[in-house]
Image (spheres, helix red, strand yellow):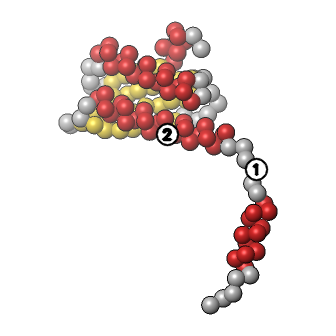
Amino acid sequence: MALEAIDKAISVQSSNVDLGGTFRDHARQSIIRAAHKYFGHLNTASVHVTREGPLFRCTVNIQMGALKMMSAEAQHDDCYAAFKNALNKVEKQLRRTKRELREDKPIRTDKDTMLRAGLSSSPAM
C-alpha cells in the first residue's frame, strides 16, 4: 500500500485535547510499524485520545486484511504512554491471531488415545 493511502487509512483524533503534529506523526509511524510487522495489509486504523480528569484515555482500533477489528484502550497520565499501552494490547491481539492462523500442526490422535487409555487403566486407590 502506498504511503499516501496508508496515511489516509489512519486517523488520529481527540475530542478535548490538543494533540499536536508530533503525537499524530508518532501514532501513525507506530501503527505502520505494527502493521508491517504482523500482517502487512492495513485496512484502517484509528486513534482517539480523550482527557478524563488527570488521566488520558487512548483507544486504538486496527483492522488488518480480512480480520476483524482489533481494539484496545489504556489510561495513563501521559498521552504517549497511554497510546503505547493501548498499541501494545492491540499488537498482542494481532500476534495471537497470527500465531493461531500459522499453527498448522496436525492433532496427534494416537497420543490422545494413549493418554486416555493410560488414565482409564490405572488402578483405583
Q: Residues within 10 Å of mark 2 (few under 14, many from 20)?
A: few
Q: Residues within 10 Å of mark 1 (few under 14, many from 20)?
A: few
Farthest residue toward the bottom?
125
State the residue position of label 2.
Answer: 92
- Please name whichever residue, 34 or 60, is drawn nearer the observer in this view of the structure: 34
Position of residue 68 measured from the top left corner of the image (x, y, whole percent)? 59, 35
> Which amino acid is tagged 1?
Pro
- Please name whichever residue, 40 or 118, is drawn nearer the observer in this view of the structure: 118
Residue at (43, 23) in percent of width and height: 30
Residues under numbered marks 1 and 2 in contact, where contact means CB atoms less than 8 Å apart: no
State the residue position of label 1.
Answer: 106
Locate residue 100 relative to residue 4 in the image: left or right.
right
- Please name whichever residue, 81 or 18, is drawn nearer the observer in this view of the structure: 81
Label 2 sits on a secondary structure element that is: helix
Q: Quadrant of residue 23?
A: top left
Residue 11 visible, this angle: no
